[in-house]
Image: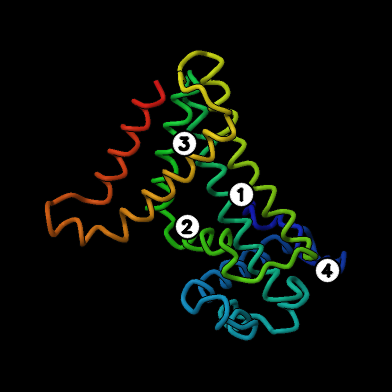
Amino acid sequence: MVDDCCNFQGVIDIPQKKSIEDKQKKTKMIVDAAEKVFFSQGYKKASMDDVAKEADVAKGTLYLYFKSKMDLYYAIGFRALRTMVNMFEEAASKCSSGREKVIEIGRAFARYYIEYPDYYSFIVAYQTESVLLSKSNPGITETVKESRKLFELVVNSVKEGMDDGSISIKMDPVKLSAVLWCQTSGVIQLAGLKENFFQMFSSLTSDEIIQAHIEQTERKLK
């Protein structure tokens, strides 16, 4: 199976004599290496030399595939976002009503946080622009597309719920989707950060807090 990062548009064209399969494998290997370097050192401290060393390729070879550290940053962001999109789509595909889709997307969001903590942190950094984003870089187009898909999945599920009657809240669907997104994202982040503090008062875990939020959201949407 071809890794999603291999479809990332920031990758530079290389001589035609190289097969597509070889190019995809090499691209995946480089992005895998970049993830290890970026996640362990942070974007600002990481260098192309570090990535080349981790990938066990010559620096010149690395630059044939990615012309800058920013291109690698976008490639990782694309992979992280695509993974989340796939999880959201799979969760929604098993539901029969709009409200169910919204709730299952929320649960998928929580699973993503647990299963892909590095990706989650990376997306938070990306979306808060902790790394200077270059609007002229073609990679930004691909990552923005994936970000749009995520929110559109929520908006479309909310609209479906309003149409099928499973969501009774009277509000603009985009506004409601934004509120739900912010609430869920905030609870997921803070539940993990404040778990030790809350356990000074009870045995409450971050998973239990997140689950309680999702159950409360489901009740409010009825």
The residue that appears at 57% across and 43% down in the rendered structure is: 85
- Place of residue 7 in the rendered image (x, y in percent of width and height, measured from the top left): 71, 54
Separation of marks 1 and 3 at Cα, in angstroms? 25 Å
Label 4 SS: loop
| Label 3 neighbour load within 10 Å: few <14, some 14-19, many 20+ | many
Separation of marks 4 and 1 at Cα, in angstroms? 21 Å
Q: Could you say which disc has been placed on residue 22 in the image?
A: none
Residue hosting label 4 = 14
Of pointers 1 and 3, the one earlier in the residue sequence: 1
Of pointers 3 and 2, the one earlier in the residue sequence: 3
Tell me if residue 102 comes above or below residue 36 in the rendering.
above
Mark toward the viewer: 2 or 4:
2
Residue hosting label 3 = 105
Q: What's the amino acid at mark 1?
A: Met
Residue hosting label 1 = 1
Placement of the C terminus among the 4 image quadrants: top left
Separation of marks 4 and 3 at Cα, in angstroms? 39 Å
The residue that appears at 53% across and 35% down in the rendered structure is: 177
The residue that appears at 53% across and 64% down in the rendered structure is: 125
Separation of marks 3 and 2 at Cα, in angstroms? 15 Å
Q: What's the amino acid at mark 2?
A: Tyr
User: Horizontal placement of 108 versus 134: left or right?
Assistant: left
In front: 30, or 110? 110
Q: Could you say which disc has been placed on residue 120 in the image?
A: 2
Tell me if residue 46 comes above or below residue 126 in the rendering.
below
How many labels sit on residues?
Answer: 4
